[in-house]
């Protein structure tokens, strides 16, 4: 077959594991510095280029890594070690993405992500679809616990104007559920976009600690139930339409990342759904895969 060979998901994951071992040891006493950021940028470019070489393409774009003015790290009483601040934890977890807001939510650090700098101005939001995916990967075998998460996700879909679930499929072991929800009759695209904006705004406000009057009660309650459902799950990757929520533990507790996906990111996840099955590396893998997808799309335009 002519043309470029598209990379396989297993190849992306293998490269990402290698990258993580070499460059993502920023935990414990490590702080995010300008030197770390420069090293991070060069590493992302190197691995994006490796992946693109699998397709017979090349990447000329360097990835800039920004840092957060997150305050000083704090000492770990008793050990003498300096623990990273919440801002440093958020930036490390964000990988190539930008951190919008972050705050403590129960025992988790909630981090809202914006787009990757390399995709600035190109990562357009997805259009309103007649149906959306409501998927979840959960590192648990407890079906009752999983059902509480699924119910919370279906409630989020309902807030977005969708009803379901339909076409539900389950895998056991670590539980994976795929399902769809359909746009309710009488709701047009403009109304659905308003629902999406309201939910995004509520999560942004929650992520800066506004949990009372400024946050719409319905959206805040639905998101709180999702967080509560994920509370007893060690790691998870869930998606309601274009909203991605990833949870995993780090050295100081739990990290929860929330990202409103772009149209290109959605297409990438639909093509490589296995990215969602390793929550700890989901964001990193997605960023690398999106850069490659964008390179391929540009080269074929």
Image: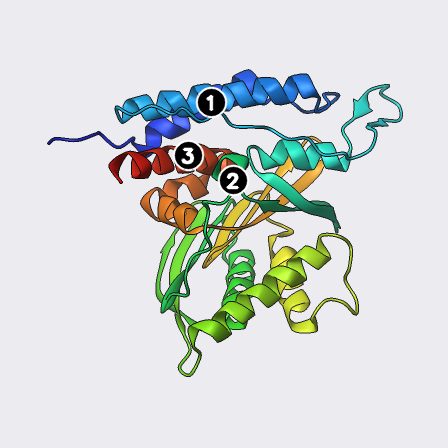
Mark 3, secondary structure of its residue: helix
Q: Is residue 9 left or right of residue 148?
A: left
**First in sequence: mark 2 or mark 3?**
2
Label 1 environment density (alpha carbons within 10 Å; few <14, some 14–19, many ≥20): some
Locate the C terminus and report the quarter of the image it occupies: top left
User: How far apart, in angstroms, are the residues tagged by discs 2 and 1?
Assistant: 22 Å
* Marks 3 and 1, how far apart at CA: 10 Å
The x, y position of residue 61, in whole percent, is 44, 27
Q: Is residue 99 visible?
A: yes
- Farthest residue, direction left: 1
Tags 2 and 3 touching, CB below 8 Å: no
- Residue found at x 63% / y 50%: 232
Q: Point out which mark residue 237 bears.
A: none
Residue at point 37% right, 20% down? Answer: 50
Front-most of 206 and 180? 206
Q: Residue at x 43, y 77 (%)?
A: 188
Q: Which mark is residue 279?
A: 2
Q: Position of residue 184 (x, y in %)?
A: 42, 78
- Near mark 3 (Cα within 10 A), the count class, few <14, some 14-19 or many ≥20, is many
Instruction: First in sequence, mark 2 or 1: give its number.
Output: 1
Quadrant of res 225? bottom right
Location of residue 204 in the rendering, given as x and y in whole percent from the top left corner: 67, 56
> Which one is in front in this view, the residue at disc 2 or the one at disc 1?
1
Q: Position of residue 18 (x, y in %)?
A: 46, 19
Of 246 and 175, which appears nearest the observer?
246
Residue bearing mark 3: 291
Q: Nearer the viewer, residue 41 or 10?
A: 41
Q: In this rendering, would 293 be left or right of 108?
A: left
For mark 2, give the secondary structure. Answer: helix
Instruction: Find disc 1 in the rendering and name its residue.
Output: 45
Q: Quadrant of the N terminus?
A: top left
């Amino acid at each position: 077959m002519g043309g470029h060979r598209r990379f396989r998901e297993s190849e992306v994951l293998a490269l990402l594991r290698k990258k993580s071992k070499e460059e993502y040891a920023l935990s414990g006493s490590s702080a995010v510095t300008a030197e770390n950021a420069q090293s991070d940028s060069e590493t992302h470019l190197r691995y994006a280029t490796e992946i693109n070489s699998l397709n017979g393409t090349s990447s000329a774009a360097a990835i800039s890594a920004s840092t957060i003015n997150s305050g000083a790290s704090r000492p770990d009483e008793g050990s003498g070690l300096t623990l990273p601040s919440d801002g440093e934890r958020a930036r490390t977890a964000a990988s190539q993405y930008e951190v919008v807001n972050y705050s403590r939510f129960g025992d988790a650090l909630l981090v809202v992500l914006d787009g990757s700098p390399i995709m600035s101005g190109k990562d357009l939001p997805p259009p309103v679809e007649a149906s959306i995916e409501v998927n979840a990967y959960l590192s648990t075998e407890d079906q009752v616990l999983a059902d509480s998460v699924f119910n919370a996700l279906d409630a989020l879909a309902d807030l977005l104007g969708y009803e379901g679930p339909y076409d539900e499929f389950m895998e056991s072991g670590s539980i994976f559920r795929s399902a769809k929800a359909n746009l309710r009759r009488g709701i047009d695209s403009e109304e659905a976009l308003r629902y999406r904006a309201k939910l995004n705004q509520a999560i942004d406000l929650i992520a800066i600690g506004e949990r009372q009057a400024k946050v719409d009660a319905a959206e805040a309650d639905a998101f709180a139930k999702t967080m509560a459902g994920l509370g007893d799950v060690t790691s998870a990757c869930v998606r309601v339409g274009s909203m991605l929520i990833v949870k995993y533990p780090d050295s100081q507790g739990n990290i929860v990342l929330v990202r409103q996906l772009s149209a290109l990111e959605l297409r990438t996840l639909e093509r490589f759904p296995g990215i969602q099955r390793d929550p700890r590396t989901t964001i990193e893998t997605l960023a690398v895969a999106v850069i490659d997808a964008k390179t391929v799309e540009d080269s074929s335009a």
